[in-house]
Amino acid sequence: MNKIEICFSPALYPAYHNPEAVVVVVDIFRATTTMVTAFSNGVSSIRPVASVEEAEAYKRQGWLVGAERNVKRCAFADFGNSPFDYPAEKVAGRDIVFTTTNGTKAITCAKDAFRVVTGAFINLSAIARYCAAQKRDVVVLCSGWNDKVNVEDTVFGGALADFLIRESGYGIASDAVRIALDMWISHHRSLLAYLMETDHYARLVKNQLQDSVSYCLSQDLVSVVPVLSVESGYFVLRPDCRTDS
């Protein structure tokens, strides 16, 4: 039986690393939601980088760059870390370099897994179907905040676990999954109200960036699954499968 595991923070990932698993990296507020949105609007590829310095170097070379630190868009960047920054008329057919406080770091942590994909509530069912089709164990890697646990990524892990357990016969790998499942089952009907009490929601409000929260919590708006690969020595995300009806 394949199992689902949940790692609450990149700092914990060495204890959860499974080289044969599919790793679903999630940063609900907002990096993975933003990347999934960008792909649904026609972005050709996203090159995730860990540091601002790398992103600035790409910008000097003429690349389009999305960059954020501590929820704020970096001054040199073309885009920030809001899903609304990437409309089709600006990004369709383009390649983008992307760095964020937490999400791109988590992607780098997971690079040695069998496969790495980026998930969000907006592509929840597509991610679940993709994982089930691989017939492998799944590890949800929550990006958290500066290596600390957060609620929004954890509750997404519970949502994905619920789907894979009910629909695809997955087993529970650890107590971390039970914790996340309890959070999801208890609060999925009032997710926005639940997450309005969280640390990261407060950060977004403080910086007047809460406009994307409802969108970030919307389920199954798109069906694109971004998948990480190595191309000429660089990590690159590309859309792997589209199952739009």
Image (cartoon, grey):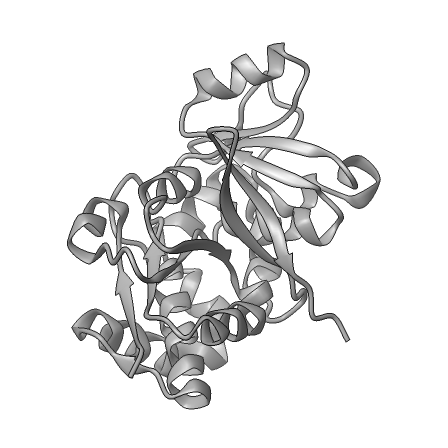
- Residue 2: horizontal and vertical position, in percent? 31, 78
Query: Residue visible at 53% across and 65% down?
Result: 121
Q: Residue furthest top?
A: 60
Given residues 209 and 141, the one toward you in this image is 141
In the picture shown, does residue 231 fall above or below 227? above
Q: How many marks?
A: 0
The quadrant of the image that shows the C terminus is: bottom right
Residue at position x 68%, y 15% in the image: 62
237 w.r.t. 151: above or below: above
Horizontally, residue 140 falls left or right of residue 179, namely: right
214 or 22, which is in the foreground?
22
Q: Is residue 198 placed above or below 63 in the rendered structure?
A: below
Asked whether the viewer can see residue 51, the reply is yes
State which quadrant residue 168 falls in: bottom left
| x and y, in percent, of residue 200 in the image | 40, 48
The residue at the point 32 percent across, 46 percent down is 112
What is the x, y in percent for residue 25? 41, 54
Image coords of residue 145 (percent x, y): 32, 44
From the viewer's side, name the closer residue of 3 and 141: 3
Please tell me which residue is depicted at 46% across the width and 29% down the height of the picture.
233
